[in-house]
Amino acid sequence: MAIQKHISLVLQLVIVALVFNRANGSSLKLGFYQNTCPGAEAIVMKTTANYIYQSPSLAASLLRLHFHDCFVRGCDGSVLLNSTTSNQAEKDAPPNLSLKGFEVIDAAKAAVEATCPRVVSCADILALVARDAIHLINGPFWPVPLGRRDGRVSIALESRSLPSPFANITTLKANFASKGLNVKDLVVLSGAHTVGVSHCSTIATRLYNFTGQGDTDPSLDPKYVPLLKSICLPNDKNTTLAMDPGSSQSFDEDYYKVVLKKRGLFQSDAALLNDKLASLYVKLYSQSHGYKFFKDFQDSMVKMGKIGVLTGKAGEIRRSCSLVN
Ligand code: HEM
Ligand SMILES: *[C@@H]1O[C@H](CO)[C@@H](O)[C@H](O)[C@H]1NC(C)=O
Ligand SMILES: *[C@@H]1O[C@H](CO)[C@@H](O)[C@H](O)[C@H]1NC(C)=O
Ligand SMILES: *[C@@H]1O[C@H](CO)[C@@H](O)[C@H](O)[C@H]1NC(C)=O
Ligand SMILES: *[C@@H]1O[C@H](CO)[C@@H](O)[C@H](O)[C@H]1NC(C)=O
Ligand SMILES: *[C@@H]1O[C@H](CO)[C@@H](O)[C@H](O)[C@H]1NC(C)=O
């Protein structure tokens, strides 16, 4: 009975998502550059591979960069723009803390420009690089419909529309819903935290001063706290720690096991247990041996990659990803 209800709710969400997708990003196409720049996807892949073989940890950074692009003004490459004398760009907003991998995008763009100047957008290159990077560390592979155009605006203050690591489940759901993403997308995309690191500064309050009384967040496994404190001393802002310790460079379902053990690093990870449907997904993915997680992650990445895209004659194709033309 409960399962049937759950399934019908999931079906409803899927239908809502399909309808939403159609109005949003439906003009992106697989193989968009087939005639105008047939080598583009292979060039991007090759450039990405060169970087990832040298430095596999970049894969996580590149995935996060794509996410930050899409959640602020849509997937329009706005996260790649530099600040100017008169404008502070997204890159320089507080949540950028540790955004990395810009050099990979610049290198891929330069390689593509050398073959077909002014044809392939930076927003598309970022979407492709993120996909290729994750696949190169044996993560899932998802189709990337193309044809995004680059925006001309990047505003630091708008980075507020990114979800906060301190957010509760209500706020997270509302934030994702405002991007056309449902609870399932929230849970499955949070699974990106199976790779990569966080800075100690992000969890300092949780460890040392949760309610302002020098206390620790009770939703964190008390047996895990001493280890976290030994890595993150009070006021240490620099040290990084793995979000999925032990397999932080392997894309797997372990993140969900970590969350179930109350060892997710952020309040936003822990919050996934505070909603009936979300926690069902956490359990489902934790037990799926990767298969279900990979499949659903692929679908949600395609959806995320369509948020607020510019297509047709909107925007521009930048010459350099960090500057408007
Ligand atoms: C659900 C809301 C989310 C919140 C609140 C959140 C927050 C964060 C924070 C605070 C960090 C660590 C930053 C630092 O201290 O260096 C981080 C890292 C990361 N996030 Fe998220 N994130 C969310 C969703 C996502 C999504 C949807 C993706 C991608 C699909 C993603 C991918 C990543 C990756 C890969 C890293 C590691 C980056 C690296 O190692 O360089 N996150 N996230
Ligand atoms: C954008 O900023 C980065 C970092 O400050 C810098 O290395 C890069 O040269 C800038 N890009 C351009 C085109 O000026
Ligand atoms: C992030 O923003 C800070 C200012 O808040 C800036 O000093 C730093 O250079 C930015 N980092 C990147 C990678 O752009
Ligand atoms: C969730 O966070 C929001 C914003 O901080 C707050 O207004 C709301 O009361 C919180 N909800 C719950 C159930 O704690
Ligand atoms: C803990 O939080 C309280 C209230 O915000 C603040 O007054 C106090 O200075 C904080 N303590 C530390 C050690 O940061
Ligand atoms: C933290 O990083 C800053 C800038 O990278 C550096 O100047 C400082 O020495 C570092 N602090 C510690 C404790 O490692």
Image (spheres, rainbow, N blue to C red):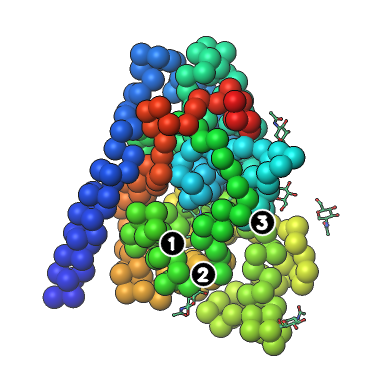
Q: Which residue is mark 3?
A: 94
- Which quadrant is home to the C terminus? top right
Residue highlighted by disc 1: 175
The response on whether ligand 3 sits within 8 Å of label 3 is yes
In the rendered image, which residue does mark 2 sit on? 167
Q: Pointer 1 and pointer 2: residues touching (CB < 8 Å)?
A: yes
Residue 221, which numbered label? none
- Work out whether residue 135 can be spotted: no
Please tell me which residue is depicted at 32% across the width and 43% down the height of the picture. 24
Q: Amino acid at mark 3?
A: Pro
User: Disc 2 beta carbon < 8 A from ligand 1?
Assistant: yes
**Residues at marks 2 and 3, CA–CA distance in whole angstroms:** 16 Å
From this view, report whether residue 22 is shown above or below residue 269.
Answer: above
Q: Looking at the rendering, which quadrant does residue 218 occupy?
A: bottom right
Instruction: Give x and y (percent) for residue 175.
Output: 44, 62
Q: Percent x, y for residue 312? A: 37, 28
